[in-house]
Image (cartoon, rainbow, N blue to C red):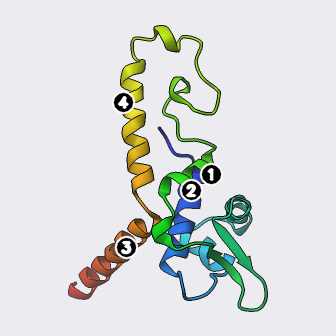
Amino acid sequence: MKLSTRSRYGLKAVVDLAVAYGEGPVPLPVLAAAQSVSEAYLEQLLRLLRSSGVVKTVRGASGGYALCCAPETLSVGRVLKILEGGTALTDCVATDGRGCENACVCSARPLFLKLQSKIDSVLNDTSVFDLAKDYIEQKRRIEHEKGLS
């Protein structure tokens, strides 16, 4: 499974919102600058996440985007399914009706099903909070290393 830029930028924006959770909305320009992506593109992704109930917009001078739920309750799998439309490794393991005509006679399908199961498990068992926590630790380590140089 190769993630598109849509998933990479969208997930990173959701992680940034998780880091800021409880501190108020994050303005679109701040999110876009953190990802080095255009505001217009990121806004498209956030609009998709908003329509799915993951993020909300706050209007006004101190407005921006915020998560609708606690980061601990939001799985990476849910975010990626919204952004990608699914996380199937191949058509033969897709649950969205795309399927494969040869699924019943495919010698590789058992392997694909095992891989898909592991992928789904990792994505659904990893919360956005987990990613945010790791990201904060990574930034702290980098800052610490810079201070030692």
Q: Which mark is residue 83?
A: 1
Residue 40 locus on image (x, y percent): 74, 65
The span from disc 2 to disc 4 (Cα, nearest Å) is 22 Å
> Which numbered dot is residue 133?
3
Disc 3 residue type?
A: Lys
* Amino acid type, callout 1: Leu
Residue furthest toward the left?
Answer: 148
Q: Residue at x 22, y 84 (%)?
A: 149
**Element type at mark 4:** helix
Are circles 2 and 1 on residues that touch, CB within 8 Å? yes
Q: Residue 132: where, in percent of width, then height?
A: 42, 71
Could you tell me which secondary element the residue under label 2 belongs to? helix
Determine whether, in the image, residue 80 is placed left or right of residue 55: left
- For marks 2 and 4, the one nearer the N-term is 2
Position in image of residue 126 (x %, y %)? 40, 58
Q: Is residue 53 above or below residue 20?
A: above
Which residue does the numbered mark 2 point to in the structure image?
A: 79
